[in-house]
Amino acid sequence: MGVYKIKKGFFGMSLIKALENASLDDVFVLEENYCENIGKVTIRQDITIIGTPASIPGEEQQRLTNTLTGQIFVADGAKVTLQNLTLNHLQRVSGTQSNAINVKQSTLRFDHCILISDVPASNYPLLYIENSDLEMLHSKFKSNGQGDIEFYIPNSNFEISNSILENIRIHSLNSNGIMMDTSMENDYNCVHAVDSTLEIYNSTLNGKTIVTEEGTAYPTVMLDHVELTSENSAYYQEVVSKNSLYAKNNSIFRSVNDSIKWIGLFDSKAYFNDTVIQGQLHMHRSYAYAQNLTFQDAVEDYYYLFAEDYSTVYGSRIHFSDHAYTLFKMSSYSSFVIDEVDLPQQYENVHRCDENSRVCEFVTESKTENQKEVVSSVSAYKKLQSLVGLTRIKDEVENIRKLVGFNESRKKEGKKYRNYPYIVYLWEILVLEKRWSQD
């Protein structure tokens, strides 16, 4: 292990020469304003490359002075850290059949770096991370692409923290990812996850629908058999009436205190706690549990909530804040089981349901006394208990109520508690809800 100064001039040692002779845990410090085209370099040792930033008068932030161009390959279990560097115009020409940065069975860490590429991604993403660990801290990644995959991450673990992504499409395949205090800016951003587990905290994801040459459309977040936990984050979509988040193929979405513009659920589950949906929640053969879920920013000719094909909406409170012709629609054996619903000041119809769907009676309260409308003083729970039969459903719901009560008591006592409701068996149970009318 050694620390080496990389400097310009006749007597200086170039970075590429230093990398060729690197030993385990070597640290290379680039002098201020040192820049180099490193060509195509493969790193097989644990090393750290650190740039020397310059101070900006009157500001705490520093200016990066070191720029590298070329291609970087990390292999053979190496652990590489890049710090205080600008990686600009990295080469990824299609004829070379390679990526700008390629990591296999290794670890790569960016810390206070800027990664910029003006070259179209084509079939070779900016970052290719396979069977590896990727960490991005306090960094910025920018592409001039228009929907190409820029980060391709199969079978890996990745964390993006306190960073900015511009025009970046991330494709996670069978991977585990965390995004914290990060923003995706400009138009062509997308997180496309397949068979993965994701966590997103305190982040903002802006995007627009990306349509590939094959005609496949990708919203800001696309989940395909993925479990996503999100808290204190915002999901936006440039085009009105297009999903910012779409979940399919048995995905699970857990949302706490998020703001989301249009959601689509297809064969999936969602748990909303203190979440705001700007637009519509469209459900197809899906299940949603809502606790203090707010709908706002209605779009003409669209419902706030549209559930179809054996979908179920269950929970304690839903708030419709703005005017809409019809607030929600249930069709094809779908169910709406909510204890309390707040209606907007103006509306024409509360709901529309076909003959095979069911809306349990609930209490609704509007903002003014004149518009206060009590549909029923009996909660959904009491209504269920009053029905004949349904022993199994009643027992399971009662057990869940006890678990939720236990969880709330621990919360009040300051003890460790779960952030999400104990709704474990309701998916299986409420699918049988269509039997209610037959008992």
Image (cartoon, grey):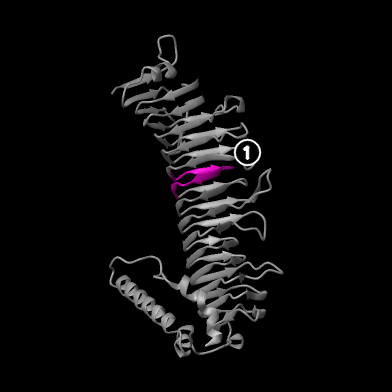
Residue that protrudes farthest toward the top in the picture: 10
Q: Which of the pair 434/298 is nearer the observer?
A: 434
Q: Looking at the image, can residue 251 be seen?
A: yes
Q: Is residue 165 magenta?
A: yes
Residue 77: image x %, image y %?
A: 36, 32
Q: Is residue 170 magenta?
A: yes
Kindly identify the amino acid type of the residue bearing the numbered disc 1. Answer: Gly
Residue located 52% across and 40% down the image: 152
Q: How many marks?
A: 1
Describe the element under mark 1 as helix, strand or loop. loop
Looking at the image, is 48 positioned above or below residue 304?
Answer: above
Looking at the image, is 301 positioned above or below residue 39?
Answer: below
Residue 91: image x %, image y %?
A: 56, 26
Residue located 54% across and 28% down the image: 98
Looking at the image, is 113 positioned above or below residue 429?
Answer: above
Residue 105: image x %, image y %?
A: 40, 34
Residue located 38% across and 29% down the image: 76
Residue located 56% across and 71% down the image: 311
Query: What stretch of residues is rendered in magenta?
Result: 159-179
Magenta segment main secondary structure: strand
Q: Which of the pair 419/11 is nearer the observer?
A: 419
Q: Which residue is mark 1?
A: 145
Q: Looking at the image, can residue 36 be seen?
A: no
**Which quadrant of the view contains residue 300?**
bottom right
Instruction: Give the position of the N terminus as an image quadrant.
Output: top left
